[in-house]
Amino acid sequence: TCPISHVDLVVDAGAAPNRGADGSGWPAHLEILQLGAAPRLSGDAEAPPPGELDALGEAPALAHDDRVFYPESHQRWRVALAPEATHLAIVGRFNHPTPGTWQATVATPVPAAAAGGRCPADDAPPPCVFVLVDHEEVRAGAAPPPGFVGDGERCGSRIDGRGATTAGGGRPGGHARDRQPPPLERGAPPDPPPPPAAGSLPRGPG
């Protein structure tokens, strides 16, 4: 198998990730924790104080990262996974949190079988975890959630072994500049040219 030691966290912030009293969009503060087990939180639980986040899992958090996301911003950064990490917990700090939507949990990618007996090169992109934060809601997963735009950079294979890209991942159609025509299948001939219009004949030499 091919061990997975890193993931790319790719985060989209919507127009109003953290609304103020007047409904205007404020920056959102996210905390990302690596846990050795799924967190013991119910969907309606209130967000624990920052000092108590390490108690989300069965044991203290293995790693803890803090980030601030401004409205309509996109960020990507590489995270080294602790060998014991099984889940990432993404917790949002909002002015007016909504029960059940202030956090999301994602299982870390599992080691993949070597393709053709070979593991990806050291400089190959790692798998991605996609996060969308908007209107006091955090959504995350190994695939882009609906409405995700991303930065257009490629990701490594996901857990199911298929390639992933952040370009227009969840938004219907994505951006025109991000869309690429599908490649021809190996060995498939190109489409034949269209026949000449009725009543016309190809002009011969001379």
Image (cartoon, rainbow, N blue to C red):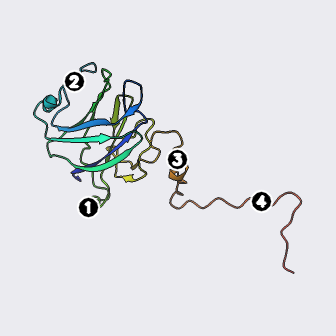
Residue 162 rendering spot, x and y as whole percentages: 38, 48
Q: Nearer the viewer, mark 2 or mark 4?
A: 2
Labels 2 and 3: the sequence-earlier one: 2
Q: CA distance from mark 2 to mark 3?
A: 37 Å
Which of the numbered marks, if any, corresponds to residue 195?
A: 4
Residue at position x 49%, y 39% in the image: 171
- Which residue has dot 2 on it? 41
Q: CA distance from mark 2 to mark 4?
A: 65 Å
Q: Is residue 125 above or below residue 106?
A: below
Choose top left, top right, bottom left or bottom right for residue 133. Answer: top left
Labels 3 and 4: the sequence-earlier one: 3
Q: Nearer the viewer, mark 3 or mark 4?
A: 3
Q: Nearer the viewer, mark 1 or mark 3?
A: 3
Left or right: 76 with respect to 191? left
Which secondary structure lies at badge 4? loop
Labels 1 and 4: the sequence-earlier one: 1
Q: Nearer the viewer, residue 25 or 191?
A: 25
Whether residues under marks 2 and 4 lie with C-beta atoms below 8 angstroms apart, the answer is no
Q: Residues within 10 Å of mark 3 (few under 14, many from 20)?
A: few
- Which residue has dot 3 on it? 175
Which secondary structure lies at badge 2? loop
Q: Nearer the viewer, mark 1 or mark 4?
A: 1
The amino acid type of the residue labelled 1 equals Asp
Whether residues under marks 1 and 4 lie with C-beta atoms below 8 angstroms apart, the answer is no
Which secondary structure lies at badge 1? loop
